[in-house]
Image (cartoon, rainbow, N blue to C red):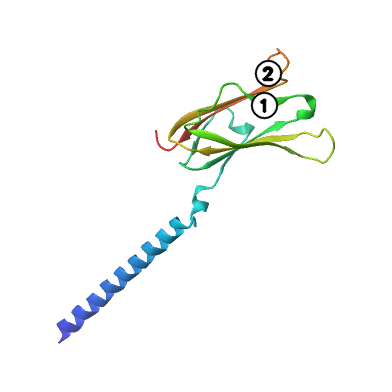
C-alpha cells in the first residue's frame, strides 16, 4: 500500500512538472508569435564615441546612429562609400535640433535595420558637398550582424 501511494505521489509530481513545462512553452511561443519579446532586441545606439570601433547588432535588430551636426552652416554628413544593403538597410535619416532657435546645431540621426548576416562599414564625412576641401570630420564604424 505504501509503495502504491509513493508511486502515485511521484507520478503527480512528474505530471505537475510536465504540465508546468507545457504551460511555459505555450507562453513562450505566444510571446514570440505576438512580438512580446521585442524588448530582447533593443536598438543599439551609437554616436561619435564609437569612432573606429566594431559594433554587434542582432539579426533583425535596429542600429541608431547620431552625430553632431549644424546644417545651417552648409555642413552635412555624407557616405564615403555605400553601406552593404544586404547587411544593413537605412530606414530613416533626419536632423534633430537641440534648440528652437534658427540655425541651431543638433545632431543628424540614422536608423538602420540589420537585414542579413555579415559585416558592413558605415563610413561618413562631415563636409560641405560643393567644396573640394578635406572633410571637417570623419566617422567610421564596422557593424557585425549575426555571427560571422
Residue name at image x 47 percent, y 31 percent? 86
The answer to whether residue 5 is above or below residue 23 is below
Q: Residue furthest bottom?
A: 1
In the shown orientation, is residue 98 left or right of residue 60? right
Which disc, if any, is residue 77?
A: 1
Q: Secondary structure at mark 2?
A: loop
Q: Which quarter of the rendering shows the C terminus?
A: top left
| Residues at marks 1 and 2, CA–CA distance in whole angstroms | 9 Å
Residue name at image x 68 percent, y 14 percent? 134
The quadrant where residue 44 appears: top right
Q: Residue furthest top?
A: 132
**Mark 1 or mark 2: which is in front?**
1
Residue name at image x 82 percent, y 41 percent? 100
Circle nearer the N terminus (1, 2): 1
Which disc, if any, is residue 42?
A: none
Most foreground residue, 1 or 63: 63
Q: Residues within 10 Å of mark 2 (few under 14, many from 20)?
A: some
Q: Which residue is mark 2?
A: 135
Residue name at image x 73 percent, y 20 percent? 128
Residue 132 is situated, as x and y percent measured from the top left of the image, at 70, 12
Q: Which quarter of the rendering shows the N terminus?
A: bottom left
Residue 80 is situated, as x and y percent measured from the top left of the image, at 60, 21
Amino acid at each position: 500500500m505504501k509503495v502504491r501511494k509513493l508511486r502515485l505521489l511521484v507520478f503527480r509530481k512528474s505530471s505537475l512538472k510536465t504540465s508546468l513545462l507545457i504551460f511555459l512553452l505555450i507562453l513562450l511561443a505566444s510571446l514570440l508569435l505576438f512580438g512580446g519579446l521585442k524588448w530582447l532586441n533593443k536598438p543599439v545606439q551609437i554616436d561619435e564615441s564609437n569612432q573606429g570601433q566594431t559594433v554587434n547588432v542582432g539579426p533583425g535588430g535596429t542600429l541608431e546612429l547620431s552625430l553632431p551636426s549644424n546644417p545651417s552652416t552648409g555642413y552635412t554628413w555624407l557616405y564615403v562609400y555605400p553601406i552593404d544593403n544586404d547587411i544593413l538597410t537605412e530606414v530613416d535619416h533626419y536632423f534633430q535640433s537641440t534648440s528652437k532657435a534658427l540655425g541651431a546645431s543638433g545632431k543628424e540621426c540614422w536608423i538602420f535595420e540589420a537585414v542579413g548576416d555579415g559585416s558592413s562599414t558605415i563610413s561618413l564625412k562631415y563636409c560641405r558637398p560643393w567644396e573640394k576641401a578635406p572633410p571637417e570630420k570623419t566617422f567610421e564604424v564596422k557593424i557585425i550582424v549575426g555571427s560571422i
